[in-house]
Image (cartoon, rainbow, N blue to C red):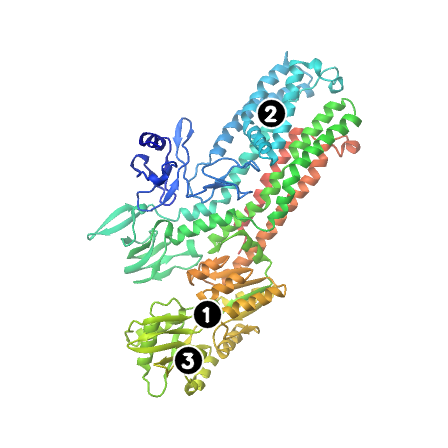
């Protein structure tokens, strides 16, 4: 591509950075040779975002910039595998595609377009409806009335209903017949027959005639298109509401921030913040990016992101998150993560992905929908044949009405929407409650769980333990031993390591950095501190290295009986002593466990701690089922054995050593206060790290599964009852035949009702 052509190509496209929301100027966007054949854009505002721009769309003669995200930006709610760059419609079901990752301010072009078409349809259909009803009720007829109806109905069907014909034809070309196939056939047949009856009535068989006149169906075709457009508008608006949680999360981030530079505060766009910038946060302001407090203090409300109800104090060295709110106090923070790297951006991305994922229960609807439209067409043909052969005069006229009604009333869209809409709303509701759902399958499976496996540290306990006991073996000094342990634990993410470091700080001990650090997962750590080889971990770990720990066994057992975890230390392969660490039980743990046991779930605690410590914690929590001194592999093996027994297992944990078990479990639940590896291995993450979140997740999963079942029942029941009614099943008994217009209204109501039912999940009590 030549430079001239490349520049012209950029002039015909525009884009907005999906991370910072700033418009990218094509003229200043650097040209990259490797992307010469694609309209790639690179944000110059510091977000380092690469993305593909969609063509400019025009509304009212004005260009409208699309917000386009990296990669395949748009997909179908009913068919997530359908993905393309830029907006459009699904070739399988005909529904409007939605952004793969919401940006919060997308322009819904289809809704705007359908609203315009709906208004035109209403203006033209209203007099058409009055004329038709007047002829039936009062017997008056205008001169050339068929031509008047033709003039009013044709624009409604062919222009206002154009999207239905386009999508219907696309469904035939892609061999995926859908709702729009049926609508296009029904309205097309009605209009075509009416046009022939107007232009050349002599070629219509006499069996169509009523009182010597061939009927026309202009009014029916126009009313059908108008009602379907109304249903589509209502559906599109309802679908927008399902993304309300995403928009709410996106809008948490402020647009500007105060950057501290050369002793003064400068207001800048959030998109201009780079890692390392110092930012001043005043009372009543939102925090723009993830970072750490370096000066001052404040009370930060994190409920928007983590679901934590009360503000938490943030002081020097404490982390703060983008989108949270500083209620009081003032502080300066250093930016650590910006743009797409912030926790808020990651949550938005993961929630968007989860909303587009499919739940296993969706397969039932997919299997039915695949053959639904062809079956309806066959039923419509049979209906026409039966009415034509056995119906009262005018038999062909009534046969046509019944066949069109069957085509119009059937709604495979209702079946397809049943699961995705519930999942979209539920995942958004979860995000507002501090629950991060990785995919729909995890949400559905959690409702079916009958066994709950829990790690102890950081899950049932606070995960912020403190040193309560330091005992040195003969020949060693307590402070020397604790200082060596602290040096070895520097940089570790484990809660017990943090406790040792705090214990050393409380004694004014400055740890020496360790060399040759090595972690033996589930057992302990080793390294060289101050020239000595230090081993720190369980008694078994030291015994594996031929170190006798019997000297302090009695004191260790006493500490365990009180619920403390005991860590053993050796210096140069000589037993140095023990460190007792107590981790308080989370306040919400007893009530949460009672909830699960009250619903018949088996609750099992697994811990790498000594049996005595585990027994003490289990007793305080009222747990009869627990296993102690288990390795990470043991945890995974226990869960695998439970699954082999036919149990559906959920595992909750927060550490690196829990990752294998979280992966093996049917549903892995990670504590948001734990490690990134645990969160990546889990299907559900509790952002606050509170076990009460498990209860909220379980309630939501059960409510979601129930909601999906309600939607599927309604969809099946609607079609099972509606199609026979449209075919005229009640005519022999009551003399009642459903009109195509009533069928269109019923079809539109069915789709909207499914979405309305799904939206109830927004207010479900958790």
For this rendering, which residue is in front, 544 or 688?
A: 544
Of callouts 1 and 2, which one flags the residue occurring earlier in the amino acid sequence?
Answer: 2
Percent coordinates x, y for residue 390 in the rendering? 80, 27
Label 3's element? Answer: loop
In this rendering, is residue 319 above or below 212? below
Percent coordinates x, y for residue 564 in the rendering? 44, 77
Per the image, the residue denoted by label 3 is 545
Of callouts 3 and 1, which one flags the residue occurring earlier in the amino acid sequence?
Answer: 1
In this rendering, is residue 486 above or below 178? below
Percent coordinates x, y for residue 470 in the rendering? 37, 81
* 109 displayed left or right of 203: left
Q: Nearer the viewer, mark 1 or mark 2?
A: 1
Q: Residue at x 43, y 68 (%)?
A: 463
Q: How busy is the neighbourhood of tag 3: few (under 14 within 10 Å), some, or many (20 plus)?
A: few
Per the image, the residue denoted by label 2 is 222
| Quarter containing the N terminus | top left
Q: Nearer the viewer, mark 3 or mark 2?
A: 3
Label 1's element? Answer: helix
Query: Do tag 3 and tag 1 residues touch (Cβ < 8 Å)?
Result: no
* 399 displayed left or right of 705: right
Label 2's element? Answer: helix
Of callouts 3 and 2, which one flags the residue occurring earlier in the amino acid sequence?
Answer: 2
Q: Residue 457's mark?
A: 1
The furthest residue to the top? 143
Q: Nearer the viewer, mark 3 or mark 1?
A: 3
Percent coordinates x, y for residue 369 in the rendering? 63, 41
Q: How busy is the neighbourhood of tag 1: few (under 14 within 10 Å), some, or many (20 plus)?
A: many
In this rendering, is residue 2 above or below 202? below
* Label 1, label 2: how far apart the Cα atoms are: 66 Å
Task: Report if residue 464 is visible in the image.
Answer: no
Task: Report if residue 99 is visible in the image.
Answer: yes
């Amino acid at each position: 591509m030549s430079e001239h052509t490349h520049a012209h190509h950029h002039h015909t496209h525009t884009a907005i950075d999906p991370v910072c929301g700033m418009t990218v100027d094509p003229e200043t966007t650097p040209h990259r040779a490797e992307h010469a054949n694609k309209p790639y854009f690179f944000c110059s505002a510091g977000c380092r975002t690469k993305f593909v721009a969609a063509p400019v769309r025009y509304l009212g003669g004005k260009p409208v910039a699309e917000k386009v995200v990296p990669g395949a930006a748009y997909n179908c709610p009913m068919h997530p595998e359908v993905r393309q760059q830029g907006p459009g419609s699904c070739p399988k079901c005909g529904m409007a595609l939605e952004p793969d990752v919401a940006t919060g301010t997308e322009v819904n072009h289809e809704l705007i377009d359908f609203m315009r078409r709906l208004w035109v349809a209403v203006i033209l259909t209203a007099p058409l409806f009055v004329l038709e009803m007047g002829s039936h009720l009062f017997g008056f007829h205008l001169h050339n009335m068929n031509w008047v109806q033709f003039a009013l109905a044709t624009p409604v069907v062919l222009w206002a209903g154009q999207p239905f014909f386009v999508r219907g034809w696309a469904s035939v070309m892609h061999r995926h017949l859908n709702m729009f196939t049926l609508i296009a056939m029904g309205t097309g047949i009605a209009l075509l027959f009416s046009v022939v009856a107007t232009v050349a009535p002599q070629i219509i068989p006499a069996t169509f005639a009523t009182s010597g006149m061939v009927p026309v169906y202009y009014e029916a075709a126009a009313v059908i298109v108008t009602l379907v457009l109304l249903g589509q508008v209502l559906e599109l608006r309802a679908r927008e509401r399902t993304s309300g949680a995403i928009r709410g999360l996106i809008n948490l981030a402020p647009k500007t921030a105060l950057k501290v530079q050369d002793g003064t505060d400068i207001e800048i766009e959030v998109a201009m913040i780079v890692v390392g910038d110092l930012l001043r946060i005043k009372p009543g302001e939102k925090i723009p990016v993830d970072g750490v407090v370096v000066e001052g203090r404040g009370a930060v409300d994190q409920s928007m992101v983590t679901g934590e109800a009360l503000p938490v104090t943030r002081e020097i060295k404490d982390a703060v998150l983008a989108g949270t709110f500083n209620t009081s106090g003032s502080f300066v923070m250093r930016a650590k993560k910006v743009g797409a790297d912030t926790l808020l951006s990651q949550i938005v991305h993961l929630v968007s992905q989860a909303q587009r994922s499919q739940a296993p229960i969706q397969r039932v609807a997919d299997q039915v929908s695949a053959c639904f439209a062809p079956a309806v067409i066959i039923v419509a043909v049979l209906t026409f044949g039966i009415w034509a052969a056995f119906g009262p005069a005018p038999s062909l006229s009534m046969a046509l009405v019944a066949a069109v009604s069957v085509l119009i009333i059937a709604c495979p869209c209702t079946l397809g929407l049943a699961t995705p809409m519930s999942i979209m709303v539920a995942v958004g509701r979860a995000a507002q409650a501090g629950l991060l759902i990785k995919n729909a399958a995890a949400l559905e499976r959690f409702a079916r769980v009958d066994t709950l496996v829990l790690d102890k540290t950081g899950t049932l306990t606070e995960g912020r333990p403190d040193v309560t006991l330091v005992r040195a073996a003969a020949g060693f000094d307590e402070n020397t031993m604790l200082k060596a342990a602290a040096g070895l634990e520097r940089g570790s993410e484990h809660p017990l390591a943090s406790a040792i470091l705090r214990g050393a700080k409380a004694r004014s001990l400055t740890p020496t950095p360790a060399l040759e650090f090595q972690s033996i997962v589930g057992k302990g750590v080793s390294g060289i501190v101050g020239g000595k080889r230090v081993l720190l971990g369980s008694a078994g770990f030291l015994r594996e290295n031929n170190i006798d720990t019997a000297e302090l066994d009695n004191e260790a057992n006493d500490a365990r009986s009180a619920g403390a975890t005991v860590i053993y230390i050796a210096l140069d392969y000589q037993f140095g002593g023990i460190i007792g660490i107590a981790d308080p039980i989370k306040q919400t743990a007893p009530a949460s466990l009672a909830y699960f046991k009250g619903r018949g779930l088996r609750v099992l605690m697994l811990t790498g701690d000594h049996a005595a410590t585990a027994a003490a914690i289990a007793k305080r929590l009222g747990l009869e089922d627990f296993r102690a001194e288990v390795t990470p592999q043991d945890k995974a093996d226990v869960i695998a054995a439970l699954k082999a027994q036919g149990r559906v297992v959920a595992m909750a944990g927060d550490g690196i050593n829990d990752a294998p078990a979280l992966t093996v479990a049917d549903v892995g639940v990670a504590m948001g206060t734990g490690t990134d590896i645990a969160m990546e291995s889990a299907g559900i993450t509790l952002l606050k790290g509170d076990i009460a979140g498990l209860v909220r997740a379980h309630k939501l999963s059960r409510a979601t599964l129930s909601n999906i079942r309600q939607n599927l029942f309604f969809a099946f029941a609607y079609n099972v009852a509606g199609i026979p009614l449209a075919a005229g099943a009640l005519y022999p008994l009551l003399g009642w035949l459903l009109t195509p217009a009533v069928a269109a209204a019923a079809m539109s109501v069915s789709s909207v009702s499914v979405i309305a039912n799904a939206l109830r999940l927004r207010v479900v009590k958790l």
